[in-house]
Each structure stands twice: as structure tokens, then as C-alpha cells.
Image (cartoon, grey):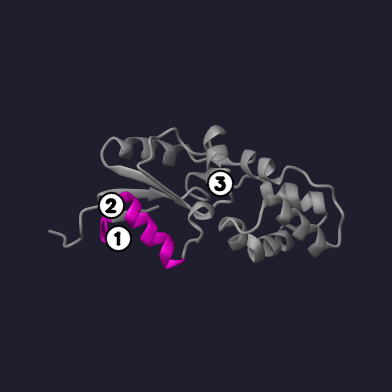
Amino acid sequence: MSNLPEIKFIFFDINGVLCYTGDVYDALAEEFGVSVKDLTLIYEKHASKIDSGKMSFKEFWGALNKSFGTEIPEVDLKELYIHKRVPVKKVHEFAEEMSKKMGVGILSNLGKGSFDDFTSCGAIPSVEWDAVVISSEVGFVKPQESSFEKAEEMCGFSGEEILLI
């Protein structure tokens, strides 16, 4: 017999779990005439500001132009970012199955307003989520301890009873 606690709640991350980025970075790198590696470095520099709601997608576009010395007219970066996502069907099926057996939720770093857009384009399965913790709505990002404390508060279980995928 195992001494492991019983899992009572599952949180799913969005990016890299419920969906993949598809060719978002390829499309943006091509738009700016830079390598995906260079684009990724700039994104990582600003990601926590975007995900905590302290930087808009429009402001990020300006940061990209400044970083690359370009003046590329703004595109709807949020639209591009969301609609290039590729759903992971097996994980969607698993989330749907688990939602019938226990509490399920979302714990993810996302920019403002992105959750509804991800849901409407099918990147997130149509599950009745018991708790949704989105970084830009709560003001802190994973892996900050505050994000996990907020997740515990919202689902009503302690860390050892929660599985994060």
C-alpha cells in the first residue's frame, strides 16, 4: 500500500498541455525577419509582464519593434497567438473524463482576456471547470508561490491533494 495522498483535484496548464503553440513563433519571426531563437529570447524577457497583466499585447508589439529596430505595423498579436494553437486531443479527452470523476481546473500563465479566446477557438476543451486561475487575472505567474496558493484557495484542496499537469 502506498503512502501517497489521494488526488482529489487536477489542474491543467494550457500552453504545452491542453494545446501547443503551433507555428506562432515561426509566423512572428518571419514577420520581423529574425530567427525563432531571437524572437523567443525577446518573448521570454517580457513573458511575465504579459502573463501578469502588466503589459498588453499592443505594448509587446512595440517592444518587439524596438528590440529588432523595425517599424512593422501592428497586427492583432492576440488573434495570431491564439488561433495558431493546436489542441492536444488526448489531453482534452482526459480532462473531460476526469471532470466526471473529480474536480478539474485551469492553472495557467496567460495575457488578459486570452482564456475566453482560447476556449472559443477550441484550444481548451468544453469542460465545466471547477476553478480557473489565470495569471493576468490574479496578478502573479507560475512558478510564484502565490499562484499555487491561489489555486489551493480556489479549488478548496491542499497541495498534496492536487495534481498539476
**Helix or strand or loop: what does disc 1 sit on?**
helix
Question: Mark 3 = which residue?
Answer: 20
- On the rendered structure, is 33 left or right of 142? right
- Quadrant for the N terminus in the image: bottom left
Q: Could you tell me how far apart the alpha carbons at marks 2 and 1 are, in whole angstroms?
A: 10 Å
- On the rendered structure, is 90 left or right of 55? left
Where residue 62 sits in the image (x, y, percent)? Answer: 77, 56
Residue found 33% across the figure and 36% down from its top: 97
Question: Mark 1 = which residue?
Answer: 159
The residue nearer to you, when weighing 112 against 15, is: 112
The kind of residue on which mark 3 rests is: Tyr
Specify whether residue 159 is painted magenta: yes
The kind of residue on which mark 1 rests is: Gly
**Crowd rating for badge 3 (residues with CA inside 10 Å; few <14, some 14–19, many 20+):** some
Magenta range is 144-161
Residue found 70% across the figure and 63% down from its top: 42
Asked if the residues shown at circle 3 and circle 2 are in contact, with their CB atoms under 8 angstroms apart, the answer is: no
**Helix or strand or loop: what does disc 2 sit on?**
loop
Asked if the residues shown at circle 3 and circle 1 are in contact, with their CB atoms under 8 angstroms apart, the answer is: no
Q: In the image, is residue 149 above or below residue 84?
A: below
Q: Could you tell me how far apart the alpha carbons at marks 3 and 1 are, in whole angstroms?
A: 26 Å
Specify whether residue 122 is painted magenta: no
Where residue 59 sits in the image (x, y, percent)? Answer: 72, 55
**Crowd rating for badge 1 (residues with CA inside 10 Å; few <14, some 14–19, many 20+):** some
Question: Mark 2 = which residue?
Answer: 156
